[in-house]
Every structure is written in C-alpha cells, then in structure tokens.
Amino acid sequence: MTSPTSVASVFDEYFAALTSGDAGAAIALALDELDRGVPLIDLLEQLVAGGQAEVGRRWARNDWNVAQEHRATSVSEEVVAALGARATPSGTGRRVLVACADGEWHALPSRVLTAALRGAGCQVTYLGASVPTQHFAQLLHELGPDVTALSCALPTRLFDAREMIEISRGAGIPVIVGGRGFGPGGTWGLRLGAHDWAPDARGALDVLASDALPAFTDAAPPLIVADGAIDAVRRRRRAIRDESMARMTRALPDVARYDERQLRRTEEDVDFILDFLCAALLVDDVGLFTEFVGWLVEILVPRGVPAATVADGLAVVADVIGAEAGPYARALEFLAAGTAVATGAARSAGG
Amino acid sequence: MEAVRFALRSADALAATLNLRRTLNCVMDLAVPYFGSWAGLTVVDGQHLRRVDSAGADDFADSARPTRLRDLDTAAVDALEEAFTRPRVHAAPAPPAVLTALGVPPGSAEQLAAPNAHLVTVPLPMRGWGRVVLAVVGRGEPGGAGLDDFARRAATAITAAAAYDERATLAGTLREALVPAPLPVIPGVELGASYRPAQEATRIGGDFYDVTPRADGRWSLSMGDVCGKGVEAAVLTGQVRQSLRTAAVVSDEPATILRLVNDTLLGTHGTKFVTAAYAVLKRDDDGIHVRLAAGGHPPPLLLRGGMVRPVPVRGTLIGMLPDVSFDPVDLRLGPGDLLLFYTDGAPEARGASGLLGLEPIEALLGDCAELTAQAVTERVLQLVLEHLQGRPHDDIALMAVRCTADRPR
C-alpha cells in the first residue's frame, strides 16, 4: 500500500490552499490522494486534522487573525464534506450519535470523526455544533444509537458535557468522548462518567472495534462535589466580574488606559477565567485551571497584554471572590495556583 | 437475593430507553446469561416476522428486512402459532419446526443435546402491538426463577417503546416539513443561518427562513416570525412559507408578495399574524442587487467596511389589517458586504442583566468583517446564548447573506 510519508509529501501544498482559502484546490488535492489509494483515515487525520492543528498554532501565535483562521477552517470543513461524500459506503455497522456539547462551536473534530466512522461502515447521525441538551435527549430515544460520541474542545463546556453523559447513560447508551476539552488522556471526561476516551478519530475507531464499551450501561455515577464552590461562584458570577473590572480599572495602570474595545475584551477574559475556574472545580483538578492560565498568557502576550497584567488580574479576581464569606477555599486555592503560573511567565519573560 | 438484584436491574434497564430496537436488544442483554445461554425474541406484526437474539441477530436494524410469514414452511408457522398461545418447555431434541420458527442458531440447538437442557418459550403479554414470543435455551430448572415476571416486564417495556416508535416516526416526518430547509449554494453569494427554537427538544418553532430559486434566475429570500410558539406556530409557518412561495410565482415585487400573504392570512380562520422580511436577490458582475420589503419585522443589519447600520425598511405587521403598506428599498451589496437578517428573539433575549439589545449584536457584527456568513450567524447566536446563560428564550433565527469577492461564474 501507500507509504506513511505519502500524506506528508502533499501537506505543504494542502496547507497553502488552506492559507489562501482555496477550497477547490484543497478538495482536489485530498480527493486525488484518496483516488491514489491513501486510506481515508490518514487523509482525515494527517491532512485535515493536521492542517487544522497548524491553523490553531498560527492563530495562538497571533501570526494569523481570526478571519484567516475562520477561512481556513471553512475550507477544512468543505474538504471533510467532500471526502465523506466520496468515501461513504452504506454502513451496517454500529450506530453512533456524534454531537458537540451545547455551547461548543468547534465542529470540525466531530465532522472528521463522523467521516471516519462512516468510512469504517458505522451508521452515524451527526448533530453538529452546540446541540441543545433537550434535543439530544429526545433524539437518543428516537434514534436508539449503540454509542454516543461527544466532542468537546473547551473545558468550559464540561457542564453541558456532563449533562449529556448523564442523559445518554440514563438511556443505557455508553459514551465515548474526544477532544482537548476532556483533558489529557480524557481524564476529565472519564471523571464525568464517560466510558472511554479517544485521542483522535483513529483511536475512536479502535475503541469501537474493541470490547471496551458495554452494549447497555447503567446510570452515570454521581459526581463527588464536596463543597458548594461551583454554585457559589456561579451565583455571584456577574457581580464578581463587574467588581473585578471596576477594581482592575482602578488599580492596574495598563487597564486604566484601555479603550472601550479593549475593556470589552478584558471583560470577556474575566468571564473566561470564571468559566475555567468553575470547570476546574467541577472535575476537581487544579491542573485544568493552571493549564488554562498558561494558555491565556500565551494568547494574550502576543496581543499586547503582558503576563504580569494577567497575574495582577487573577489576583484581583481572587480578592473579589475572597471578600465575601462562602465555600470558596478551593476556588481561591486554584486562583492562587493560576496566579503563580502567570507570575512565573512574567518573571521568565522579564529575566 | 440474586433474583431480587436481577429483578431490580431489569426494571432499571428496561425503563431507561424508549427506543424499540434498543429495548428489544436490552431484553436479550438481560436474559443471557441469567436465564440461559441463548435467547431470542420473535415478533410477528401483520404478515411479517422479525427476530432479535442474544447472538447478534437484529431484524430491527435499518438495513434489515423482515421475513414474510408466507416464506416460512407450514410446520414452522404452526409451531409459531403454538408458541404464541401458551408457555412451553421443549426437552431435547426439540422439533426442527420449532427451532426454525424461533430462529435458534445451530450452535444453540446443539446445546439442547446436553443433559438437563431445554428450550423454553413464553408468549409475551403484549397490549396492542404485534405478537412476541421469548425463547430461551438453558439448563437446570426450566426458565430458572422469575422468567414469567421477566416476560411481563419485557412486554410492558416493548409495548411502550413500540408506541413511542410509531409517534416518533410520525413526528419526525412532520418535523422535517417544518424545520428550515438547508440553504442552497448560489455562485457569488455566501449564505449562513442559525436557528434556536424556544422548544429546544423538538427544534420546531415559529421562526422561519427560506432561500429559493426564482424561475427568472434570481433568488427569493424570506425570514419571518409567526405569532405563538411551538407546534401550533410551526404549523402556521408552514402555511406562511407556502403562501410566500405561491405569491413569488405571480410577482417579483417583495411588497406585492407580502401583500398577497396578508390577504391570504386575513382570509383564513382565527387571528394569525406574522412579521416577515422578503428580498429578491440578483447576483451580477458587480455585486448583489437586493430588493427588500418588510412587514413588522426588525430591519436587517448591513455590514460594510467594518461599519454596521440597519437597512431602513418599514411596513405593516402582516395578517392583522386589510390595509397594509410596505416601503421597499433597493440595496446593492458589493464584494465583502454582508446583510444580517434576524428575528426579535435575538435582541430580546433576557439574561441576568435584562434584554440583550441590539447594540452588542451590532458591535459584534462590526468585528465580523472577514468571517464566513455561517460563522457570523454562529457568532451572533453564541453571543445571545451566552447572554441567556441557559434561561428560557423565544425562537431565535439568524440568516446572513454575503457578496463574495469572486465573480459568479
């Protein structure tokens, strides 16, 4: 068969098509490779997913703006659609319901999975990005899949993912999860009751081919949430954000100089910090939060926000949360760990 | 103790799903190994026979076809009739006709030769859906403890699932007719749409959008919001969409088309009104010519060069009054320009801080200059949903039309 280097040899040409937003060229190239006998899964993983990973890296470094990222993503989606249309046999294999958690708008990984599963003969129902949970619940009974496959790129959607895992298991249907949102090795997904995790589409095919998933499952085990931290933070969420913004504009000289648009971005960042904090509390993993802070610094530094400002901002959020009595010990501990990460990044940037 | 545990586990598992195929397979999953080494369900509905068994046979899968009863030999049909009438225990060797009738695989039939082995058949006490017999190949005391209880529980679950299945099929077919159709591909025009009905479970509601080709090569675009919510509203959207399509055959003037729909709605029984925007699009070498009219509908937003402004188009709510007036406008979309249509569910989304309002949507749209039309509607919907934070909301529909940079050919 084809050598594993086959896809690598056309990758640069493919990525050039992504860069220029030339869907026609990208599709032609992918279909040519398929016709030459390159397995569908290789094209999906190395070309499409590989290309998209590079898109993500360029966006994170601020080499690419959002528009370039979106243009490339939309080309990737067209390529998956074209590959899927060409390679789809009439499946008689397992029935899989593929969905993104509500609020999860990164649809491409689940599209790649859908094409790969169809290529392997599975009967797939693809629900797309941001699936309303109630809709998912109803469709589970209508379709009666053998497996639910959940995709989640952002840990902030873990609350919705947990709800979908509960619903699926409640209907006796096992759940496999994938995507960075479920954590390294899928730890967070497994903690929320998923049966298995796959790092990529090929991994998902392996799980389905193995005996790892039961035909019928019991209900998801209850979560161990000892303190009331999540509810407390969520209840005060808006007040925490507004108070943090007010204090930041008073106390941080950088923020005091922000124009309206920059303030709006900062407000979004504070929202993001609270979302990630709650997600970390949900799976009780400080690593979720510190990793997020590392990423936030990585994103914000090229966009003109120094790591020291991120550290100061986190400290302000912690002050605001801690100013009121409540079950905030875990939240404050996580925020302190996050602040330390940002401070460390600021120190290494300065020295 | 084990019997109690099994009874509880069966009750939980059978109550979990409403899906017919899953329920039948669940019965099999429970029956083996508890009652024996093989189990099968034979379902006769009218003139057709389907089987599900613990060895993986599944005639309820999409790809499977039922067997016609008349294709079975007479001895097997007789054996089946016998199995439907009362419970039976067949000691080895079981009559071949019985094995054929119940679809016992050769391997399991061979196990019947073992000492103490038997084939038990129990007709399920079904109520109103087909006839079902449960067959088990096992050893020891025939049927073990509790096979009759299990059969009764299985029958209840299967009956409920079958009823749900019929209604789900019916509802699914009707829903297909009521949800927005996929957007067409138009050279030189980029379309995107997002839809979030108030009733999230069924995904149907009172907002609608349509983009359809006209006989003259141009395109008709409509978006609207009928009064009411849920299924009743959805049925009314069906009528309004049909009226719009019919009116489009006799006229190419958006104001006339809206007036015809107004007359149609006034002529029908009951109070029915609708807000709608209607546009006729023509892509030419320089861009898209848009002729637009609206009745009671929020004016679409125009994004041009990073600036956002509403398109001033006014008109009367449709379906309330005999005398209506519409002020259509002509608009030219140059390469990169984007027109965003929305229903009032978006700006009127009520979050913790009150209504979202139009300003945040306009501000976001201003940042969307280079996104695809689909990405634009998704970003706006994302904004609305984040504002709602899971609170209930009205139907929300968004549709974006962008003039692409490349020429349409």
Image (tube, rainbow, N blue to C red):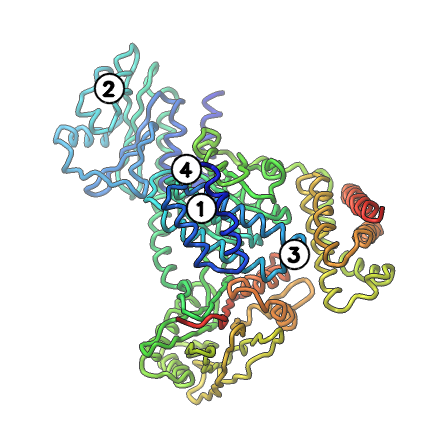
Judged from this view, the residue extending furthest toward the top is B115
User: Disc 2, disc 1: CB below 8 Å?
Assistant: no
- Inspect the image, locate mark 1, and give the three-letter code of the amino acid beneath it: Thr
Residue hosting label 4: A2
Q: Distance between the residues labelled 3 and 4?
A: 34 Å
Work out whether residue B117 or residue A46 is closer to the camera in this orientation and state it: A46
> Chain ID for label 4?
A
Residue B335 visible in the current orientation: yes
Residue hosting label 3: A63
- Inspect the image, locate mark 2, and give the three-letter code of the amino acid beneath it: His
Q: How far apart are marks 3 and 2 (CA)?
A: 76 Å
Disc 1 crowd rating (10 Å Cα; few below 14, some 14-19, many 20+) is many
Whichever of callouts 4 and 1 sits on the residue coming sooner in the sequence is 4
For residue A114, the mark is 1
Whichever of callouts 3 and 1 sits on the residue coming sooner in the sequence is 3
Residue hosting label 2: B90
- Inspect the image, locate mark 4, and give the three-letter code of the amino acid beneath it: Thr
> Chain ID for label 2?
B
Disc 2 crowd rating (10 Å Cα; few below 14, some 14-19, many 20+) is some
Question: What x and y, as percent, mark residue B139?
Answer: 33, 15
Mark 2 vs mark 4: in front: 4
On the image, which quarter does residue B178 sit in? bottom left
